[in-house]
Amino acid sequence: MADQRSLVTVVGARKRVDVALPATTPVGEYAGRLADLCGQDGHDVFPPAWSLTPAGGAPLALEDSLVDAGVADGAVLYLIDVAGDPGGEPAIEDIEELVADQTESYRAAEPPRGLIVIALSLAWLAATGYVLLRAHGGLTAAIAMTLAALVLLGTSWGLQQRRSAVPPGLCLAMSMASAACMAAAGGLLFAELSAGLWWVGVIAGANLGMVMALATTPELILFAVELQLLVAGLLIPLFLPLRVTAAEAAAAVVVAAVALLGGSKWIAASITAWASRPPKSSAPMAQAVTGLLVRARRVLTFVIAGPVLALTVAQPVLALSGNWWAIVLAAVSGTALLVRTRQAGFRGETIAFGVSGLAGVFAAIGAVAHRFGGTGATAVTLVLCGFVVLAIGVLISLVQLPITESTTDVSLAGAAAAGRRSVAEVVGMLCNLAVAPLAMGVYGVYGELAAIGAGIIH
């Protein structure tokens, strides 16, 4: 779902339309307009009461929304006149039995306790690695974390081979936790060589752990994560010789993260297409395309997770450095992320881009306000900006998307058909183009050029 809309296909007697419907609005509020779009005919005596129904399922209640009915993106729904075909006699149920049945269904949907314990153990091991790394645990701690990573990899591989009741997602989490343990082990080992090289060991250990995880659990998501870790590894030759400051390192991270986000959809689609098998000749094309879309969406979540997390950490570092180039870079990168929320195809993307973008803008505004007005001005400015964001959210919530002919053709990314670029797209493009020049300012390139020019003149 994108921006609280569901992308579905509605089939009528004469036409079918691909449309973005309000996910939380009752079906009865817009089913009549859908019937008009599809050219439906009503009864001569009684006025029609249009609703939607999945293939072979019961009609949706007019007061229920698509979210209440559990309708997912890509579903095919059929128009039905519930006034002409009410679907049977009303059923009268006992309230106590209804509550008991509903409670039992909730209990059945809860994860087993064993899986919860496994998830907590993974969090325990990850926290242990962080604590040992902060406490400079030494060689013994590095060996312990390496053994923990190997045990996790072996357990994940064994559970997959036995096809146990443990869900594949938890096995994937074990593999990623093993990479986190290897990252901690690498940081501890490099800290023994030099206290300032612990971060190099973390990156190297994470890459090694992810390669080991890929060898035992060849999953698309692990490959997507390793691709981002590889980019982090490529930054090491830049940081070590230059002996960069925290702000300079953060500027390089912002440039790399923005570049990854720019190609995130292409990367996710390429990984999915490369790892997918061609569909069988007897399989319907719609089923194959839907499967590819589901896998690409899952991979895209992890492709954008790394850059978004890096930006969320790097932007406050830039804003707190006191360098004007760094402050502007934090504001521009945060604005670019906020613009991306309008182009996001799914709600998860919107939340990730929104949180990271607000972190950058928040840090930049706070730094500027503190520079000119001190703590009091910072507090007032941040509170006022918070109310501005609240007002924008309220306005967006109050605006309902009308169902018209122009909104019936929706692409897989959740955006309308290509046309003129909006103002937001132009602003986002300019912000992305400005990231690299601003990062050069953080590194002092323009100051050096000005000094060289002044030397030539004099």
Image (cartoon, rainbow, N blue to C red):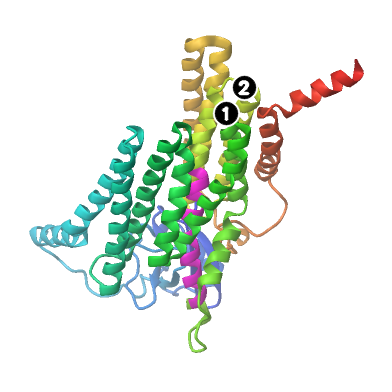
Where does the image place residue 169, in percent across and percent down from the top left?
33, 61
Evaluate whether residue 4 shows in this view. Answer: no
Q: Alpha-carbon distance for marks 1 and 2?
A: 8 Å
Where does the image place residue 20, in percent across and percent down from the top left?
52, 59
Pick the front one: 157 or 423? 157
Check disc 1 and give the amino acid type.
Answer: Ala
Kindly identify which residue carries mark 2: 323
Q: Earlier in the sequence, mark 1 or mark 2?
A: 1
> Which residue appears farthest toward the bottom when viewing the image?
282
Q: Main secondary structure of the magenta part?
A: helix
Q: Is residue 133 above or below residue 63?
A: above
Q: Are marks 1 and 2 in contact (CB under 8 Å)?
A: yes
Pick the front one: 446 or 210? 210
Q: Residue at x 47, y 48 (%)?
A: 204
Kindly identify which residue carries mark 1: 247
Check disc 2 and give the amino acid type.
Answer: Asn
Pick the front one: 343 or 328? 328
Q: Could you say which quadrant of the image residue 330 lies in?
A: top right
Q: Which residues are magenta?
A: 288-309
Circle 1: is it few (<14), some (14-19), or many (20+) Cα within 10 Å?
many
The secondary structure type at the circle numbered 1 is helix
Q: Residue at x 43, y 63 (%)?
A: 214
Quadrant where the C terminus is found in the figure = top right
Report if residue 294 lies within the magenta region: yes
Pick the front one: 86 or 151? 151
Evaluate whether residue 408 shows in this view. Answer: yes
Residue 349 falls left or right of residue 122: right
Where does the image place residue 346, in percent across and percent down from the top left?
49, 54
